[in-house]
Image (cartoon, rainbow, N blue to C red):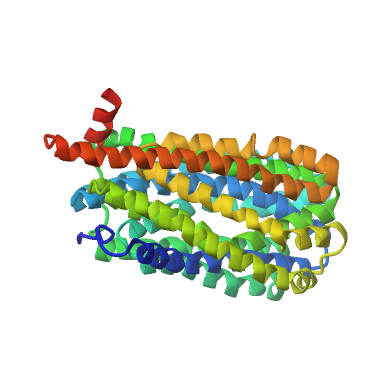
Amino acid sequence: MAQSAVFLSGNLLKHITVMSVTASVGLLALFVVDLVDMLFISMLGNAQLAAAVGYAGSILFFTTSVGIGLSIAAGSLIARSLGEEDTDRAREYMTHVMVIGLIFSILFAGMIWVNLRPLTALVGATGEAQDFAVSYLQIIIPSMPLLMCGMVAAAALRSHGAAKLSTMATLTAGIVNAVLDPIFIFTLNMGLEGAAWASVVARIAMFSTAIWPIMNRYGGLGRLSLSAIKIDFRPIIAIAIPAVLANIAAPVGSAYVTRAASEFGQEAVAGMAIIGRLTPISFALIFAMSGAIGPIIGQNFGAKKFNRVSEAYRDSLIFIAVYVFIVVGILYLIRTPIADLFGAVGIGRELIFLFCGPLSLAWIFNGILFVGNASFNNLGHPFYSTWINWGRNTLGVFPFVYFGAQWWGAQGVLIGQMAGGAIVAIVSLMLARHVMSQAEQLETDAVKKPRFHGHARDFKIWNQRR
């Protein structure tokens, strides 16, 4: 496995830009496919189908978040090992995360599959829309282990700085899905189930494309050893559990928002579903940054270059602010064509117009949360991201959405969702600055007390004892 600690030198803003832009290409492909899915389903002329996708999206968001949490563990441990110039250890970590994640995802997917009807009811689905949502999910959920393995492999590639190879995995999945969608939905007359099968094949393509360079360029998988997996289980779980818990928080908040919107009818649910697919396309670069900034911070933390860790965080926030202002301006200019494209009417159209305006400037705060969580996960404080995410998706969602709905109706659901995130983001910013300050102090103290030449965790233990 080749040495790939490429982020220890060079311009940090350039690293951030290259990693984010490259990663966003693959993510954008997947997000565009999701949006096209919604467009195709809207063309079938049944409002219940569009609502079903909205309900199913809340459940899929939940399962995908588990995969994201496991990939965070892999990316963090691999990046630190590379920063410490231990490439063999990096390979071992990737192998062990893959095995542990595969076992867990099989069990988790099984639990979700047998409880689909009560879970869809929990997010507000009823009647025909619930039936459609359940049939859609019954096809997709069994492919969760493939998605998880693909996400872990892609995270490993990003940790090596191989952003283009990681992007190829998601880009391939997007292309496969985009090609198969119209064939399955219309040509084969499979309707909503056709969209589900297209997604399954796309997940197979993603896994295959991500694992190939791991096997052929980065030394492949390590030798399977039960004793070695047991040894690594604790450090993997120490990051994976808080990361999974942190990412599960988002679908909990999303499910509550979907349920709140359902009180205003299927048009409102369909409008929120369209916004849910428009959002990641519009802010793909911010979604990509959560994975892009982690390896940069992780490698520099592993190499004990704490000043570069702080600089990377600061440059990321500048990058986010500029990007969001540009995107919001574009959304405002094309808000009418967007609503027309999906045939949105009534409350659904009003929600789209509300989103495609100044309200979306609140995505600056979501960007702060994403970068903060990536920083905490790679600086040895994964539970910070857990508490921040749960705060964002409980205290930052429930009261704001509830009272927003009471005061402004369906539009208040969206306003409340955005407003709550701003407050939690400020807390995240303050906490991140504190963590960065501690890291820089460790670097100063390490120079004064040179006996600390070991693993980065030695500094953490020493700091705790102080």
Residue 142 in percent (x, y) is at: 55, 50
Determine the residue located farthest toward the left in the rendered image.
451
422, 223: nearer the viewer: 422
User: Which part of the image, by quadrant, shows the C terminus?
Assistant: top left
Residue 433 in percent (x, y) is at: 42, 42
Residue 7 in percent (x, y) is at: 28, 59
Q: Residue at x 83, y 67 (%)?
A: 45
Determine the residue located farthest toward the right in the rendered image.
346
Q: Is residue 435 visible?
A: yes
Q: Residue at x 60, y 64 (%)?
A: 325
Q: Residue at x 47, y 70 (%)?
A: 172
Q: Is residue 234 above or below residue 35?
A: above
219, 451: nearer the viewer: 451
User: Which part of the image, by quadrant, shows the N terminus?
Assistant: bottom left
Residue 109 falls in which quadrant of the image? top right
Is 377 situated left or right of 116 in this image? Answer: left
Q: Residue at x 37, y 55 (%)?
A: 312
Q: Is residue 406 above or below residue 86?
A: above
Q: Is residue 110 visible?
A: no
Q: How many marks?
A: 0
